[in-house]
Image (cartoon, rainbow, N blue to C red):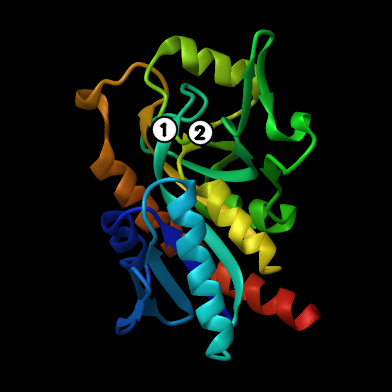
Amino acid sequence: MRVLVVTAVPVERDAVTRAFGGAEEQLSLPGAELHRRGAFDVLAGGAGPAAAAAATAFALASGALASSPYGLVVSAGIGGAFTPVTPLGSLVVADGIVAADLGAETAEGFLPVTALGFGRDRFAPPPALVREVAAATGAATGPVLTVSTVTGTAERAGALLAAHPGALAEAMEGFGVAEAAARAGVPVLEVRAVSNAVGPRDRDAWRIGDALAALTDAFGASASVLEGWNSHENLEG
């Protein structure tokens, strides 16, 4: 079985594929393109949870129809972090993938979708895999929040931390990827390289280049873990 890595945009996809050796093959999917190297298929699925979920679902279905199913899905890319716990240029591996703004606003405050009596707002990646990837990459572990609107104020950053104590980072795709993976019965992981701080937008302070380089390093360091874990889990299953 193969490993599917889903990013938002091509520059993130290319940062991931640079970590893997061997020749690259490109495969067409509806609305997207897979870049295949070895056991890894890397897909730029689009920004936001809806696009990420749709692209992941298409890829998972295509793999199953081609008798080349995926044994692991990884949501990957750059993201904002709740510094100083996770400084710019560092790595985060999610031990919880959380939909931070899926729910309802009320006079008493925000209610997550679970409080409304339906849906779910969190996925937990396999703890052993989280530990192994974190050890291989030197990443911090903790909740990563999925948001549809990137945080741009100190007030919103504070509200997110109050609602999700211990959150390390935010991004826009992890929960969508996890939702699609869960419906296909495939385990999921989220890996983020920190490009900016969550809070007031200061583009001059962002370190996108450093974060992309860290993303490449992360997959270079963890490729054997991901591929080995994937094979082991499927053999055990």
Gap in angstroms between the C-alphas marked 1 and 2: 5 Å
Picture coordinates of residue 145, whole percent (x, y): 56, 35
The kind of secondary structure element at disc 2 is strand
Check disc 1 and give the amino acid type.
Answer: Gly
Q: Position of residue 151 (x, y in %)?
A: 42, 24
Badge number at residue 169: 2
Please tell me which residue is depicted at 37% across the width and 48% down the height of the picture.
Answer: 47
Quadrant for residue 181, please give it. bottom right
The answer to whether the residue labelled 1 contacts the one labelled 2, judged by CB atoms less than 8 Å apart, is yes
Q: In the picture, which quadrant includes the N terminus?
A: bottom right
Name which residue type carries label 2.
Answer: Ala
Label 1: which residue?
Answer: 80
Residue 117 is left or right of residue 130, and the answer is right
Task: Identify which residue, 172 or 111, lies in the foreground.
Answer: 111
Q: Residue at x 69, y 9 (%)?
A: 108
In the displayed structure, would residue 191 be above or below residue 61? above
Q: What count of labels does the image hold? A: 2
Q: In this view, does 228 lie to the left or right of 5?
A: right
Q: Position of residue 107 (x, y in %)?
A: 65, 8
Estimate how packed mark 1 is, as few (under 14), some (14 to 19) or many (20 or more) residues with alpha carbons within 10 Å. many
Q: Is mark 1 on a helix, strand or loop?
A: strand
> In the rendered image of this protein, does residue 203 appear above or below residue 3?
above
| Residue 121 in sight here | yes
